[in-house]
């Protein structure tokens, strides 16, 4: 095997510290739309008010240190749009000064932003919305996704279950849109990997909860056929956390609760992740969540592209991020890259309980001709996205 | 492949051995211990209790004491080689991960991984004499033989920082692949090698011009490129070979350090991290983090000869010759 020729331009490789470099300004905006959180059975785990924002802030701090050696000056503007305020008006204001925007907002709001005339030359990162359509038929060339899709999360879990030979499943689904979307992804994934969802039930909240959970769930789950694992699609964490040990059969729970596949878990420790977890905790005074991770990854991806290209132009940054040269060390054991057919970030994904990591996916043995990370989610031949052609 | 190579000759040598024979000391990150491997018998002969989360480990240049990064205790422990006693703890700054000892046998350059700092410790006065701001997650450390340049690699900043050891100032930064883990100078100080774990390459720099001379890449049949993650490595004194630990690829690469051609791969334990080499350069000892063992490679026969079980998550390894 021959040594590979240099991939880094000499200009960058031999930058002198503190030399008279032309300073590059890299302003990044973090834009969030407040949403109404549904009521859930327990109030012990509120969604942090700064979820996502703190991830972006850590990404900025990481970039700024590198930038200090390179003459690159990163800044982050936080804009949180309260419920009832004009989202698109706020978006226009942000886009007037920023060509790089990390967004934490539901899919419809995100798409409306991406379709603004002001956004056409911008680079937008989706750090929270998991809807498949954003990566498929409704994909946009100016929109990249650091948050995994429902399909990627479902595939991660299904690979784990198949690896354990736990292919007989039942599923309980909530009634919210996100529950149904994740349930659909789990169904598709079961088909894709050869698992069987033998029965499904919908938890409609009409049960008499004056009877306690320990009385309600056994009856509700009593008529399920025999199964290895009970899947739960309850994305808000409403009833799902109470299924384990309260069902009729003593079976593990996985999905939205129990063993949960996600972009991140505060239980990830290997791959240098302990350092990222500690840095985040010092900054935010709480554990790092999936939206934090996705926002962090978006800001870091920009930082990596600016470091390697020496440019702060959104178009050049986008082109570099989607190129083969891009890679980001992101504390999950393999370099992070982006799918050039729909802008989705390829990534290993933890399957974890609240107390421990269960597995890091993709699982060994799930092979792919290009990247094993492409065994998670829709692959290039199946894509309905044409905006990246 | 596990094979006993304890020959009659080796036994004779062992019996006639001096007070301390050739040893390899291995830090076990999640056991808070050091495993001491006797080189001739290839067995663990002693386990020492040390501070929390031991990682970087090395001997003083006279091999009288061992230095250990007890990361979670935020200290450098000094261990007497003859008695195996911890003599004292030295200040290190927060969370020391790795370090390098200056040729003066007195100053240790330490990576404080959570604070973006390189600390310089004076082991005689037992105090930190300088703290140098570096990139995010400083890791690899190297000092040239002349003692004029100290290197710190920053894992998240993806740079090797070149530090002037007189002024304690960074005078050059070199961008490398993602997550640089380890750095070493050639014995003539003319070249610097830096491994990039996620980038997957081993970078070689000219120490006068700071130009990158090569990036060595690795390819192993049936091993996914994601899993080829260069971490620790060792250069031979004659600068003809460099042995590179490839992490989850579970291999040590044998590389021609002049042509940069990869010559061979040796299968070792799981997630191989760092290594130590005997002073006659006939044996290599690799720490295999996930399988909890050390693979001993016979460099003359060019094959692994034994796996030695050590503690949980062996991280660093250091070799000491027999007392003369």
Image (tube, coloured by chain):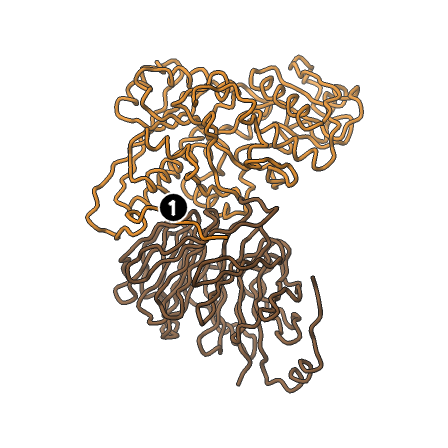
From the viewer's perspective, is A87 left or right of B75? Answer: left
- Front residue of B8/B323: it is B8
Residue A30 percent coordinates (x, y): 36, 28
Q: Give the side of residue B40 with respect to residue B232, left or right.
A: right
Give whichever of A380, B316 is nearer the camera. A380
SS at circle 1: loop
Q: Within the image, what quadrant is residue B166 found in?
A: bottom left
The image quadrant that residue B131 belongs to is bottom left
Q: Position of residue A258 (x, y in %)?
A: 64, 32
Q: Splitting the image into 4 quarters, where does residue B291 fall?
A: bottom right
Q: Which of A313 and A382 lies nearest the eye of the viewer?
A: A382
Q: Which residue is mark 1?
A: A7
Left or right of B111? Residue A248 is: right
Let me know if residue B53 appears in the view.
Answer: no
**Label 1 CA crowd tier, 10 Å (few <14, some 14–19, many 20+):** few
Residue A231 position, x and y percent, is: 68, 26
Is B248 situated above or below B131?
above
Q: Which residue is drawn at the image coordinates 66% and 66% (left, top)?
A: B306
Residue A96: give x, y in percent of width and height: 26, 22
Q: Colour of chain B?
A: brown
> Drawn colour of chain A?
orange
Is A359 drawn above or below residue A113 in the view shown? Answer: below
Residue at the spot 21% in from the left edge and 51% down from the top edge: A19
Give the residue at x 48% y 77%. Answer: B63
């Amino acid at each position: 095997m021959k040594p590979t020729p240099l991939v880094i331009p000499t200009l960058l490789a031999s930058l002198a510290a503190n030399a008279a470099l032309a300073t590059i300004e890299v302003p990044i905006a973090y834009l969030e739309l407040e949403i109404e959180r549904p009521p859930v059975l327990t109030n012990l785990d509120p969604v942090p008010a700064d979820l996502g924002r703190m991830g972006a802030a850590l990404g900025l701090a990481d970039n700024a240190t590198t930038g200090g050696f390179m003459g690159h000056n990163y800044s982050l503007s936080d804009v949180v749009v309260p419920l009832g305020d004009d989202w698109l008006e706020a978006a226009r204001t942000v886009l007037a000064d920023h060509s790089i925007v990390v967004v934490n907002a539901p899919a419809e709001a995100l798409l409306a932003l991406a379709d603004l005339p002001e956004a056409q030359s911008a680079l937008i990162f989706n750090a929270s919305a998991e809807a498949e359509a954003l990566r498929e038929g409704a994909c946009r060339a100016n929109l990249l996704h650091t948050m995994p899709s429902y399909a990627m999360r479902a595939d991660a879990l299904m690979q784990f279950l198949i690896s354990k030979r736990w292919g007989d499943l039942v599923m309980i689904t909530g009634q919210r849109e996100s529950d149904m979307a994740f349930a659909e992804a789990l169904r598709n994934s079961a088909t894709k990997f050869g698992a069987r969802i033998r029965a499904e039930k919908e938890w409609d909240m009409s049960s008499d909860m004056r009877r306690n959970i320990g009385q309600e769930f056994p009856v509700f789950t009593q008529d399920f056929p025999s199964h290895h694992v009970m899947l739960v699609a309850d994305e808000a964490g409403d009833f799902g956390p109470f299924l384990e040990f309260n069902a009729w059969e003593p079976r593990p729970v996985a999905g939205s609760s129990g063993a949960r596949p996600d972009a991140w878990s505060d239980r990830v420790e290997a791959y240098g992740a302990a350092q990222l977890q500690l840095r985040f905790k010092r900054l935010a005074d709480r554990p790092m969540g999936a939206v934090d991770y996705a926002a962090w990854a978006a800001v870091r991806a920009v930082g990596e592209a600016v470091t390697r290209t020496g440019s702060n132009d959104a178009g050049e940054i986008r082109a570099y991020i989607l190129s083969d040269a891009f890679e980001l060390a992101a504390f999950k054991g393999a370099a992070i890259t982006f799918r050039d057919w729909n802008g989705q970030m390829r990534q290993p994904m933890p399957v974890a309980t609240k107390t421990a990591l269960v597995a890091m996916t993709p699982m060994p043995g799930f092979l792919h001709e290009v990247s094993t990370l492409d065994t998670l989610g829709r692959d290039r031949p199946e894509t309905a996205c044409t905006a990246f052609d | 492949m596990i094979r006993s190579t304890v020959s009659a000759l080796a036994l004779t040598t062992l019996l006639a051995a001096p007070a301390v024979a050739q040893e390899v000391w291995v830090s076990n990150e999640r056991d808070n211990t050091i495993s001491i491997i006797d080189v001739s018998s290839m067995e663990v002969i002693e386990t020492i209790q040390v501070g929390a989360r031991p990682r970087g480990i090395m001997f003083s240049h006279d091999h009288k004491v061992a230095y250990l990064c007890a990361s979670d205790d935020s200290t450098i422990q000094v261990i007497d080689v003859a008695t195996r006693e911890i003599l004292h703890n030295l200040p290190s700054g927060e969370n020391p991960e790795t370090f390098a000892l200056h040729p003066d046998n007195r100053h240790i350059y330490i990576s404080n991984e959570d604070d973006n700092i390189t600390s310089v410790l004076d082991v005689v006065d037992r105090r930190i004499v300088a703290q140098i701001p570096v990139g995010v997650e400083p890791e690899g450390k190297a000092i040239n033989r002349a003692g004029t340049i100290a290197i710190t690699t920053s894992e998240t900043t993806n740079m090797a920082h070149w530090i002037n050891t007189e002024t304690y100032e960074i005078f050059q930064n070199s961008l490398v692949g993602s997550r640089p883990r380890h750095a070493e100078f050639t014995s003539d100080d003319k070249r610097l090698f830096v491994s990039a774990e996620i980038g997957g390459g081993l970078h070689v720099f000219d120490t006068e011009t700071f130009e990158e001379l090569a990036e060595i890449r690795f390819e192993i049949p049936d091993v996914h490129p994601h899993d080829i993650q260069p971490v620790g490595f060792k250069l031979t004194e004659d600068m003809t070979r460099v042995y590179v630990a490839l992490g989850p690829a579970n291999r040590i690469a044998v590389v021609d350090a002049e042509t940069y051609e990869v010559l061979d791969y040796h299968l070792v334990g799981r997630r191989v991290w760092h290594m130590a080499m005997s002073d006659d350069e006939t044996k290599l000892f690799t720490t295999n983090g996930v399988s909890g063992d050390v693979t001993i490679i016979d460099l003359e026969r060019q094959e692994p000869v034994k796996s030695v079980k050590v503690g949980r998550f062996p991280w660093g390894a250091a070799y000491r010759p027999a007392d003369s």
